[in-house]
């Protein structure tokens, strides 16, 4: 709500100042610095130098003309003339033509002062994805330039006390705590800067670092610790800009491909967990240093880190025993947001850097899912969203502003291409897109890193395999072409029509690419994907049961696989419940985005912690209906769910006939969903 009318103590004939876009206004005596008026009214106007005309963050623009709404005429000469400092900043172009430094310009008459977005402390940064929310910047650490009185025999206060007083006077902050390493360097830093220094203050109360002279930048690192990939984003904490993004394979892969095998490694080897902890910390530290170098930033200037990761990654990074996450009741050592010195998890950024690890939701729904929740904010929406973060273990969040539920589902590694005949991790040269002509049954495909299709002239790459999203597409296309039946069987009778369908023992295989290497979809591949997608669907359906709903308004696919997969094929295969195809979308690396939001906005960090505590957890392992949902979801897209919204958009083959009895289905060779996570 804009503050309106008179400021306490103002008199009616004093100039009226209106700040836009906030609309805050008040009367001030002529001669009041405009920055002081803004502060008094609580206007969001930046300042790093405490009003000394150095930082140029406090720029405003005078709107000229008659403002009937406010009953005033505003003009540029209703501010005092340009100061020497403003002239100097204009010459260096740090002060824009037509702008004024609000700390230098004094009020001389009625005024409408516009605060451009670049001068706002809590500015928004626009995310590239059109449907996504923007991020509001409100970092935990801020630089504050101060000029501290030198020590004086007559006033024998210590450096820290004099610095605190300068911060109070310049920025209105009351620093109550100071990190020891910052206190240790106080004397040398103040001396080096001639008692001019930039203090880095965390949460407006803790002195965390100090540099001689004027600094107006501070940096942070958002980290996504995936079981397969590590990703870091080095950000400017004040602008929100991502300056460098780097990723690499999680070196823990050598201890086990999926989460469960890493938990097993920790259980079977005395130093197993410690080895994995060391491996991931070393890799993250290297990435952090590389990201700083890529951005041209000193590692010691990175003062804040925010980290998201699934529960096993979370525990291994923090040096917590992951073994209890391998069996019921899947007990987490801590599910709270954890704040610690970055050095404690091996990040060699400098003694001032603090790390924040996002909270976990439950034993199988980790800080990565919390990151997705922060990125997508289903708790602020009316519509019911199902968020699916697909990995070796799918993490599911369902709900809206009224209620949020979470569960995980044991999908296994098939979606990542593991345990499939030609499956590979997503990498350049691996098939990621497949189309099958329903008349000729001929395929065409595309590989990662090449925009061309295989039937285009000049196409020559020899793909080395097919990634998880490619297999999902291939099976969905086989289904649309009538080669794979709704029960998942590859139709052997088509071998007479197409050389692509070949016998393989008692079953059949569809050959996408003949020759060396041959790339094919076997009957077992289809089964593996059916098992994985049925587990995913069953988990989602359980959450819907618990919420008492039969349909969701929106499905958001997150995670590496979720961002690679074409949402249409996820729906076609029945990985997710029926929904308008246009409302099944990919959120990209939403866990990483969540880490970035937690890095850039201290209030949203607290909001996330509150929301996460309110999420109801559903443990799929002990829900009797899981198996029932799982069996029905083995069919493509589903045995009994009508998928009416999908059918309205796509011509689908009819659903398979109802089975003679569930008991026979339960004896299938592929087994049920495995809960040995
Ligand atoms: Fe820094 Fe005005 S507050 S230049």
Image (cartoon, helix red, strand yellow):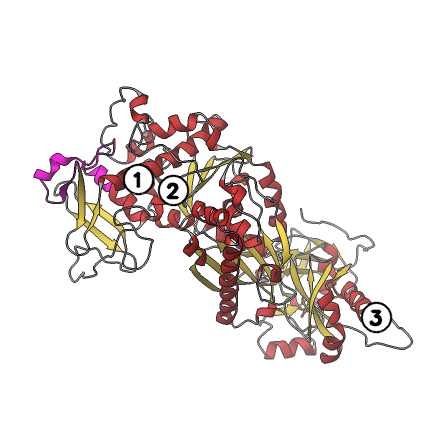
As helix, strand or loop, the secondary structure at mark 1 comes to helix
Image quarter for ligand 1 equals bottom right
CA separation, marks 2 and 1? 9 Å
Sequence order check: which comes first, mark 2 or mark 1? 2
Classify 10 Å Cα crowding around label 1: few (below 14), some (14-19), many (20 and above): many
Classify 10 Å Cα crowding around label 3: few (below 14), some (14-19), many (20 and above): few
Quarter holding residue 572: top left
CA separation, marks 3 and 1? 69 Å
As helix, strand or loop, the secondary structure at mark 3 comes to loop
Residue 357 at what x, y percent from top left?
58, 52
- Disc 1 marks which residue? 528
User: Which disc, if any, is residue 412?
Assistant: 2
Looking at the image, the residue that sits furthest to the left is 496
Classify 10 Å Cα crowding around label 2: few (below 14), some (14-19), many (20 and above): many
Residue 434 at what x, y percent from top left?
24, 48
Magenta-drawn segment? 477-506
């Amino acid at each position: 709500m804009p503050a309106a009318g008179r400021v306490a103590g103002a008199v009616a004939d004093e100039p009226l100042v209106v700040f836009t876009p906030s609309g805050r206004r008040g009367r001030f005596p002529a001669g009041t610095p405009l920055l002081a008026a803004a502060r008094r009214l609580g206007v969001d106007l930046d300042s790093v130098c405490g009003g000394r005309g150095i930082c140029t963050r406090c720029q405003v623009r005078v709107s000229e003309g008659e403002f009937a709404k406010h009953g005033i005429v505003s003009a540029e000469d209703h501010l005092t003339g340009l100061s020497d400092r403003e002239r100097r900043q204009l010459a260096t172009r740090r002060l824009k033509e037509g702008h004024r430094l609000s700390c230098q310009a004094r009020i001389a008459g009625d005024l409408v002062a516009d605060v451009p977005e670049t001068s706002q402390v809590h500015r928004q940064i626009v995310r590239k994805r059109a449907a996504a929310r923007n991020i509001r910047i409100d970092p935990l650490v801020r630089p504050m330039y101060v000029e501290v009185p030198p020590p004086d025999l007559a006033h024998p206060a210590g450096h820290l006390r004099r610095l605190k007083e300068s911060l109070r006077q310049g920025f209105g902050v009351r620093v109550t705590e100071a990190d020891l390493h910052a206190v240790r360097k106080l004397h040398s830093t103040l001396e080096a800067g001639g008692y001019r220094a930039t203090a880095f203050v965390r949460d407006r109360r803790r002195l965390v670092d100090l540099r001689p002279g004027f600094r107006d930048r501070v940096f942070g690192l958002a980290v996504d610790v995936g079981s397969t990939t590590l990703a870091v984003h080095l950000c400017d904490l004040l602008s929100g800009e991502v300056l460098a993004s780097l990723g690499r394979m999680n070196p823990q892969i050598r201890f086990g491909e999926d989460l469960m095998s890493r938990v097993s490694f920790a259980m079977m080897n005395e130093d197993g967990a410690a080895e994995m902890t060391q491996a991931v910390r070393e890799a993250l530290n290297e990435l952090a240093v590389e990201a700083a170098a890529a951005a041209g930033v000193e590692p010691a200037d990175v003062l804040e880190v925010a980290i998201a990761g699934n529960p096993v990654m979370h525990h291994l990074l923090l040096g917590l025993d992951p073994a209890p996450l391998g069996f019921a009741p899947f007990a987490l050592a801590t599910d709270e947001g954890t704040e610690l010195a970055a050095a404690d998890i091996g990040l060699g950024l400098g003694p001032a850097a603090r790390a924040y690890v996002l909270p976990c939701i439950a034993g199988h729904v980790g800080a990565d899912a919390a990151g997705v929740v922060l990125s997508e904010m289903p708790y602020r929406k009316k519509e019911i969203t199902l968020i699916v973060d697909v990995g070796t273990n799918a993490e599911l969040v369902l709900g809206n502003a009224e209620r949020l539920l979470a569960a995980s589902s044991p999908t296994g590694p098939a979606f990542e291409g593991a345990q499939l005949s030609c499956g590979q991790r997503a990498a350049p040269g691996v098939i990621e897109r497949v189309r099958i002509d329903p008349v000729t049954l001929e395929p065409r495909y595309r590989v990662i890193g090449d925009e061309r299709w295989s039937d285009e002239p000049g196409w020559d790459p020899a793909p080395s395999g097919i990634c998880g999203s490619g297999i999902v597409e291939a099976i969905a296309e086989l289904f649309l072409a009538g080669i794979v039946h709704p029960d998942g069987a590859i139709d052997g009778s088509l071998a007479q029509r197409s050389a692509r369908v070949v016998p393989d023992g008692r079953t059949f295989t569809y050959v996408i690419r003949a020759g060396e290497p041959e790339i094919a979809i076997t009957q077992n591949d289809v089964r593996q994907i059916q098992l994985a997608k049925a587990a995913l669907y069953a988990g989602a359906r359980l959450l819907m049961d618990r919420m008492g709903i039969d349909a969701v308004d929106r499905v958001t696919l997150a995670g590496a696989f979720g961002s690679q997969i074409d949402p249409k094929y996820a729906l076609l295969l029945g990985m997710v419940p029926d929904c308008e195809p246009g409302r099944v979308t990919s959120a990209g690396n939403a866990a990483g985005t969540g880490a970035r939001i937690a890095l850039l906005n201290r209030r949203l960090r607290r909001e996330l912690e509150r929301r996460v505590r309110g999420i109801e957890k559903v443990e799929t392992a002990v829900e009797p209906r899981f198996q029932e949902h799982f069996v029905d979801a083995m069919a493509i897209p589903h045995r009994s769910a009508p998928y009416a919204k999908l059918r309205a958009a796509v011509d689908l083959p009819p659903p398979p006939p109802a089975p003679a009895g569930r008991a026979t289905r339960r004896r299938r060779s592929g087994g049920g969903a495995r809960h040995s996570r």
